[in-house]
Image: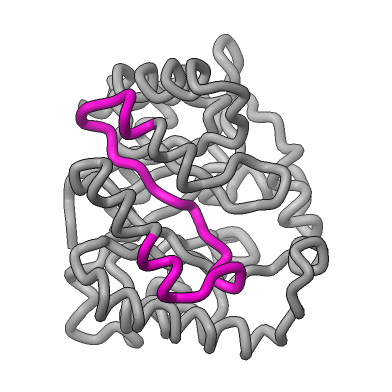
Amino acid sequence: MPNDFRFGVSLRTAESQSQIADAARRAEDLGFHVLNVPDHLGAPAPFPTLTAVATATSTLRVGTFVLNAGFYKPALLARDATALRDLSGGRFDLGLGAGYVREEFDAAELPFPSARERIDYLRHTTEYLREHAPDIPILIAGNGDRLLTLAAQTADIIGLTGGDGVHDGTSDPLADRIAFLRNAAGDRFDELELNIAVTAMPAPGSEMPILNVPRHFLPGLSDEELLRHPGVLSGSVSAIADRIRGLREKYGITYIIVQIAHAEAFGKVIAELR
């Protein structure tokens, strides 16, 4: 399994080309390896935004985290993905997910398939891209058994959510998901890069994170439990660096993504980890 860390930052607003370029160059200067854009209606369009990022930078990779596969026909997605691969000089990682927000399918005037059908379509899309754009690294993110099985069989990078709970001394949902992934991947497991996205960390000058985002996605957990979740970081720069090292040592996770609002604060963690 890869031992070197990779750090990504997620850009969720793009008001102008100059704003995108400034954010991308700053991320590159802070030591981030990848700038990612999500795929939600009301957020920046991934492919034109990432093209602007690639144009403004020289070493920063660009990625989708993650595209809703249900929004795309495989051949059209392959056309856009290979174009961005070429325009970025090969600096593109394609992140894919099955899609989960029914309201976005409705707004796009698309039917909202069952979870099984969405994962089957994600497999169809992934297999098409493997055949027609085999040199583009694919990330698949999710948590359920069927999706992780698909990721284990076809992806290069696995985006883990940390499980639905937290390590409480008797259970470890993240370790359980990785054990499942290891079994599903078989001989491929050692080639996979494991990723986790951080949804909360302290602002500069504080050691306590704002928990609004993890509360939204994990409403069943108390604040105390959220603070123990792998996607929530707290404490000093040194303590957070130790936590990141622990994710690598215990779970083999080497690719960490933070939100753009946390870029400056996490840049100090990157410096600590060098």
Query: In the rendered image, is residue 187 in sight?
Result: yes
Residue 38: x and y in percent read: 55, 48
Residue lying at the far top in this picture: please name it: 205
Is residue 200 positioned above or below 195 on the image?
Answer: above
Q: Quadrant of residue 223?
A: top right
Q: Quadrant of residue 77?
A: bottom left
Q: Residue at x 44, y 16 (%)?
A: 22
Q: What quarter of the picture does the C terminus occupy?
A: top left
Numbered range of the magenta stretch: 53-79
Marks counted in the figure total: 0
Query: In the rendered image, is residue 268 in sight?
Result: no
Name the residue nearer the viewer: 66 or 88: 88
Q: Residue at x 59, y 53 (%)?
A: 39
Residue 50: x and y in percent read: 42, 40
Q: Residue at x 53, y 26 (%)?
A: 262
* Residue 161 within the magenta-colored segment of the rendering: no
Name the residue nearer the viewer: 111 or 234: 111
Name the residue nearer the viewer: 263 or 246: 263
Residue 51: x and y in percent read: 39, 38
Q: What quarter of the picture does the N terminus occupy?
A: bottom left
232 left or right of 251? right
Residue 159: x and y in percent read: 44, 61
* Residue 71 within the magenta-colored segment of the rendering: yes
